[in-house]
Image (tube, rainbow, N blue to C red):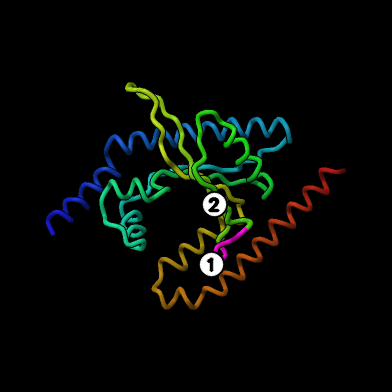
Amino acid sequence: MKKKKNEKERLRDMLADSEFSIKGQCAISLLLTKLDIINTVLLIDSGRNVIQMKNGRMKSYESVCKKMQKKGLELNFETAVEKLNDLIGVRAICAYVDDIYRVAELVEKQKDIRIIKEKDYIKEPKKSGYQSLHLILEIAIAFQNGTQWIKMELQLRTAAMDYWANLDHQLRYKKGKKEAELIDEELRQCAEVIGNLDRKMLEIRKKIDKI
């Protein structure tokens, strides 16, 4: 029991105040800068900001524990680093669906970024209706002892997808299981509306581009 407690305390300390968290913040800063550059490149090409908003975060101890328990994993730091891909995360909000793939393509071309896995929840949404493009990647960070590759997750979505995801989190995970089940179908229907809105806005933009 004491060992488990010590492992949980170590997990909390490593996530909050450690070399891992410092390197994680460096990785976030670097990826955010790269997204700024990518947006500038696409701005020159299209005459508009493709990335409307972006932010990064280190996953909180509470969120890590909840996710690991859901997956049936032991609560220790090494397991968290190995099994969870989103301990370090960046999210970018794009104007249109096709912009998401344009940004992803340029991210993949970066010499100091390696794509480990791609999860396309836009082409194949989750059962809940969730839509987003997730890139699990490693980004090279230069430290005194050499280059280190840091694993992190990049989420790319439209403003409509982000709006739905934020409300889904509040409505589904802030309530009990019974309440969540009652709203599942309604949330899926809302997700379909969001998807149709994104597709319609893209069609309108393409018509304007042709004029």
In which quarter of the view is residue 145 placed?
A: top left
Q: Residues within 10 Å of mark 2 (few under 14, many from 20)?
A: some
Q: Which residues are magenta?
A: 124-129
Disc number for residue 208? none
- Residue 87 coordinates in the image, percent (x, y): 38, 46
Q: Which residue is mark 1?
A: 128
The answer for how far apart the CA atoms under marks 1 and 2 are is 15 Å
Instruction: Give amino acid for label 1.
Output: Ser
Q: What's the residue at 51%, 62% (across, down)?
A: 167
Residue 204 sits above or below residue 43 on the image? below
Q: Position of residue 52 (x, y in %)?
A: 61, 43
Q: Is 68 placed above or below 155 here?
A: below
What residue did someone put label 2 on? 119
Q: Identify the residue shown where x is 62% and y is 46%.
A: 94
Q: Are marks 1 and 2 in contact (CB under 8 Å)?
A: no
**x and y percentages locating residue 83 in the rendered image:** 37, 50
Give above or below for 155 relative to 121.
Answer: above
